[in-house]
Amino acid sequence: MANTSTDAAFVEFERVQKSYDGVNLVVKDLNLSMPRGEFLTMLGPSGSGKTTCLMMLAGFETATHGDIRLGGTSINNIPPHKRGIGMVFQNYALFPHMTVAENLAFPLEVRKIGKTTREEKIHRALGMVQMNDFAGRRPTQLSGGQQQRIALARALVFEPELVLMDEPLGALDKQLRETLQFEITKLAHDLGITVVYVTHDQTEALTMSDRVAVFENGRIQQLAPPDQLYEKPENSFVAQFIGENNTLMGEIKEISNGTAVVQLDGGDLIDAVPVNVTKVGERTRVSIRPERVEMNKDRLMPGAKTLKAEVLEFIYMGDIFRTRLRVAGSDDFVIKTRNAPDQARLTPGTQIEIGWLPEDCRALDA
Amino acid sequence: MSNAKDDDAVAGPVPVAPVDAGPVLAADGTPLKRSLSRALRRQKGRALLLIAPLLIFVLVTFIIPIGSMLFRSVENDIVANTLPYTVQELASWDAETGEIPSEDVFKAMYDDLFLSAEAKRHTRLGSRLNYEQTGMSSLFRQSGRGIDDLAGDAEDALEDAVPAFGDGETWYALMNAGAGEGNTSLLSNVRGRIGRLNDGLASADMDFVPSAEIAAVLPRTARTYTEWAVYTVTEDERVPADNDPWELVSLALVEELKTADLSGLSGDQAALLRQAQAVEFDIPPYSETFAEIDDEWVTIIPWETIQTHSSKYTAGYFLNAIDAQKTPDGYEWQPEEKQILLTLFGRTLFMSLMITGSCILLGYPVAWLLANLPASKANLLMILVLLPFWTSLLVRTSAWKVMLQSQGVINDVLVWIGLVDDANRFVMINNQFGTIVAMTHILLPFMILPMYSVMQTVPPTYLRAAKSLGATNWTAFWRVYFPQSVPGIGAGSILVFILSIGYYITPEIVGGTTGVFISNRIAYHISSSLNWGLAAALGSILLVVVLVLYWCYDRIVGIDNVKLG
Ligand SMILES: Nc1ncnc2c1ncn2[C@@H]1O[C@H](COP(=O)(O)OP(=O)(O)OP(=O)(O)O)[C@@H](O)[C@H]1O
Ligand SMILES: [Mg+2]
């Protein structure tokens, strides 16, 4: 996981609540603890309270209840400028009346750092983002990607231990995003800084982070490393929010040491891993990733349960085939298969049998 | 990191068209440049047509009046138009000698003054010259009244001796060319002269051409008769043959006949003139006549003044506008007691700066609130800011009078709480303080609105960014917010300063004597003293001052930094 240097938590939210209007809780009972050096991403649908959390950490909003600690001390009463947290804004917020170099000098000047040290640091920070040639330009004379690099350099130039980024790449095109995603993660790891990163792009969250916090409605639904989040979602919200997912509704028939038998609404029985279901007879939502569905019987365990399926649609996508099936009464069951030489291209109307490894099939709350 | 080059290319050189390809051609073979400009021309023409009404309106209501004002400030043809012969004769006179001009000058002056007194134009000239030399106005008024005595006596003597001269017909028959040769150049000269004197065209049709024969023998008589004839026809719309000419014509005839050689003439005319030659009438020197009217005429002062200011264009108004004047001895300051305009200019600039400064100080926080309050409260505040616009300027100014006067609200309250003794009430009105207070209030919206519209465009994230970078509230404001609001301050300041430098009503009402502006002086010269030339010069100077300040502002702050919205 993270290259934790100390075990003590560096950033801590404890039972934090936030309400803007005194009626609705925008953040409900947030508990979060980050070790030093971690890259944590907050991911969630719009309005789920990500920015609010970031703003409370930065000091621009006050928590209605609870405690936020940085390096072990509560920062509830410390004004933003004394928190020493670097911040990258979505719209860059570069000061338009200053040149790039002046923008970078600003945090150093307010810290009363001498001229020579200052210049050295600016040079180094611009070097980190390969923007040394642009020191004399005004922000308006830069492209979006260049501005974003400068914003990053400015947040890093005063060497904060914690950097917050609120959808910093939201306004950029896909290719540039990917480049910058890579650069940001590399810089964060090289410098050993702790980063809290907000996005609603799940690919970005999965590729960049040490851990991802999935937000919904002011609550963290799951906090886990990307692979766990994808492969072992802990509830149906996370399962559906992250990646593509097939769901089938059913009822628990049997449950014993780590496996469950689920009777689907169509009557078929399947094996699944019980995640947050406990009782026989409970309604459940079974989740299987499209790429974990198997059509080739040979690859399944002997005696594994299979389901009948009818091909409805076959889509050629280059590297993969995407096939839509009717399975157990559901019309939008999707499977993805690799474009391998021996892979059959199914025509609509074909009847096939599908199955999966029981550990890939998770029985979640309904 | 490898992709970093991709977006650096944004700053790289723009691809250039291939060098070898000649002029680029459009689809129909014409050079692309030409077909583009043809396409654009039509567009431009249409655009021009659209703004034509405005253009014409601006031209008619703005450019032309300003041009005419600028012209009026240097125009000075009144002396040459009213006293053309005098100016001509005076040209060879040198005031340095200390001697009064020759008899010829007095004679020319007699003729000019007689004509302008008949046309009632001599008082106008008197007031014009009075700007330069006190006493000129009354001198001309008085002389205009006394000047026809001598000519009247001459006419009486002439008519006593030859009663026929009491009849307009006789004169007409004598002076008109009739079938003989006419002197049309004399006629057109006189027409021009009368026209200039009356600021109009003396071109009415008339049944008279001076006889060339008479004009050769009796030039002054012919000229004065023609002057009378033209004047009678154009101004009084009467027929010369039915009317008796001015006494001046009789005077000229009597005087000229004393020396005239009538041998070339024949017939009735010659007989009549010979008869008139016998008239016994001694004409005293003209200088004596003038001396009788006013001793002033036999000093060099009026002559010097006329000579100094006889050119068609003058810097005199501009000199007056800066408390200087052109005297026969060169340029010098006005007498101490008349020097008030420079002080007024200085005061206008100073007070306008004070007003602009107070507007910035009072307006900035309001504009900031407007830009940062939630919409509902901001709207209410906006209404309060705009409220003054819905009230008449006079009402607002008068309200300040009520507030500030010594028996006014503020003084009453102060006395009532006991802060101020009843006997020592503050003097807050009819002075500079009152003017600054009232005008700051009146011009404040012009400062707030541009500031507000600029501040609205400054996103609050900048302040947050600054604070997250470690700046205190004050530093964040001063280093990040304030510089971005400067264009608003600039726009507001220009607006307020230019408005206040030419403000009139408020200083007039609450300014008293120490708080008035140069514009009040301009208004005085336009409506009371009728010295339009000086008013125009003052206005021109004001215009130049504003342009110079604008230019300085552009050099220092940069006019592109000014945003009105
Ligand atoms: N200043 C505010 N006053 C009142 N309500 C607010 C304010 N800021 C945010 N909210 C509300 O709080 C909730 C959470 O907002 P927040 O900005 O944290 O969402 P988010 O997760 O960042 O969403 P997005 O992905 O769209 O940026 C939203 O319902 C929003 O309407
Ligand atoms: Mg947000």
Image: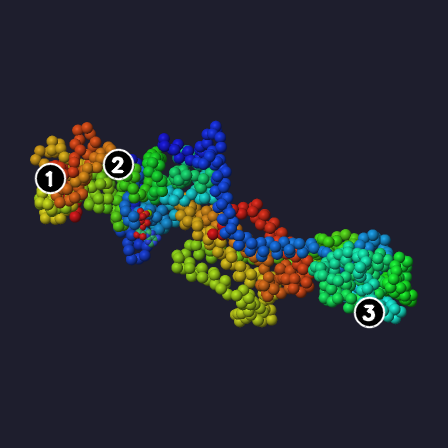
Residue under the point 12% across and 43% down: A328
Give the total of numbered labels.
Answer: 3
Q: Chain of mark 3?
A: B
Please tell me whether mark 3 or mark 2 is closer to you in this view: 3
User: Residue B253 location in percent, x, y?
Assistant: 85, 63
**Marks 3 and 2 share the same chain:** no
Amino acid type shown at disc 2: Met
Q: Chain of mark 2?
A: A
Please tell me whether mark 1 or mark 2 is closer to you in this view: 1
Amino acid type shown at disc 3: Asp
Question: Badge 2: few (under 14), some or many (20 or more) residues near its Cα, within 10 Å?
Answer: few
Q: Secondary structure at mark 3?
A: loop
Q: Which mark is residue A308?
A: 1
Question: Badge 1: few (under 14), some or many (20 or more) residues near its Cα, within 10 Å?
Answer: some
Q: Nearer the viewer, residue A63 or A93?
A: A93
- Estimate the spatial distance between the alpha carbons at disc 3 and disc 2, rounded to whole Å: 132 Å
Q: Secondary structure at mark 1?
A: strand
- Estimate the spatial distance between the alpha carbons at disc 1 and disc 2, rounded to whole Å: 40 Å
Q: Secondary structure at mark 2?
A: loop
- The image quadrant where one finds the N terminus of chain B is top left
A61 relative to B549 in the view: left or right = left
Q: Chain of mark 1?
A: A
Q: Which residue is mark 3?
A: B167
Residue under the point 22% across and 41% down: A244
- Estimate the spatial distance between the alpha carbons at disc 3 and disc 1, rounded to whole Å: 140 Å
